[in-house]
Image (spheres, rainbow, N blue to C red):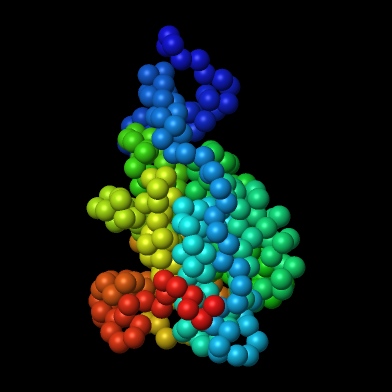
Amino acid sequence: MSGIEFTAEDWRRLKLAGQILGGVTGGLAVLTAGSAGLLLRQAADARRVIPLAEAPPPRGDGVYGAKFGGKPITMVILGDSSAAGYGVHRPRETPGALLATGVSRRLRRPVRLYRVAVVGSMSSGLPYQVDAALEYEPDVAVILIGGNDVTHFSAREQAVRYLGDSVRRLREAGCRVVVGTCPDIGAIQPIKPPLRWLARKWSRDLAAAQTVAVVAAGGRTVSIGNLLGPMFEADPVRMFSSDHFHPSAEGYARAASVVLPTLLALLGEEERPVAAVGDLETAAQEAVRAAGTEVSPAKPDGRRATLRRHPWFGEPRTWFGHKAPVPSGPSATGAVGWTPADH
């Protein structure tokens, strides 16, 4: 095809894209040169629209809820820009600060937060973050990772292995772990079809594989999926930050509100509905299809898993066929506070 030159690496990636697209459409096994050129142009267009990180996000490290007294719960947050809170301007708007505030207020205990997440990190960077996190002797860790593995065409098996090994190291040190699995990159507006369809398939496949690896290593996962996709499409000005790629403060708050129930459960608050128990592989696929689903080990051998769904922001949800009541009372507005007033 005239006007387009492909490197060996381009062809490798596009061959993989063709195989995945074949699975999506049911009939396409390879890409034509024209289709390959279209995908490359779309990827280049997306890179031009999505700006590079210009400044680090604000840090939210510190003690939240010091007025409650007692020994603080030490929390670390690891991962990429979604964990670091890139796109917001105040420490209190970062995911770590939102989660620390929610835990502190619900458990009435102080929380000491450390952020070791790095903007732009892929799963291959997690071992270094775990090294840093273990220096703080954490009680609980939150990991948000996967988006950059999709956008940088990282090998899924390697990315999952890095994540599973990281969770295992944290668990061996006595740290409880919650992982927010790969979000649906196809929900991001600068990415257009057919590249969007491929990105969605890549995201879901990675999230399912992450779930299996994390639960087998003794951690719990919460599916992020397309949690924010419909909201972003309905109100992009409010849900996106100024770069039109990363979430706004409200977007991060909604994501944090979905992770919070699992985080509270790990720390001792288990006031939740009866869950479904099933095969781990099946549970991982179920979680991918339903954003906000928690998957946790059902047995020490890691071959069985427990699934739970949670309502958020007062919306009624369905927990595996059972209608969930609309929350009421003080917790109806969510335990994730907008400001760490107790900080």
Q: Nearer the viewer, residue 79 or 155?
A: 79
Query: Is residue 325 depicted above or below 301 in this figure?
Result: below
Question: Quadrant where the C terminus lies?
Answer: bottom right
Disc tally is: 0
On the question of residue 218 being in view, the answer is: no
Query: Is residue 173 depicted above or below 110 in this figure?
Result: above
Describe residue 277's horizontal placement relative to residue 144 as left or right: left
Q: Position of residue 195 (x, y in %)?
A: 38, 35
Q: Position of residue 278 (x, y in %)?
A: 44, 70
Query: Is residue 319 depicted above or below 183 in this figure?
Result: below
Q: Position of residue 295 (x, y in %)?
A: 47, 68
Q: Nearer the viewer, residue 184 or 95?
A: 95
On the question of residue 117 being in view, the answer is: yes
Rendered residue at 54%/55% (across/down): 57
Rendered residue at 35%/83% (across/down): 331
Q: Position of residue 132 (x, y in %)?
A: 72, 61
| Quarter of the view holding residue 76 | bottom right
Rendered residue at 46%/52% (across/down): 87
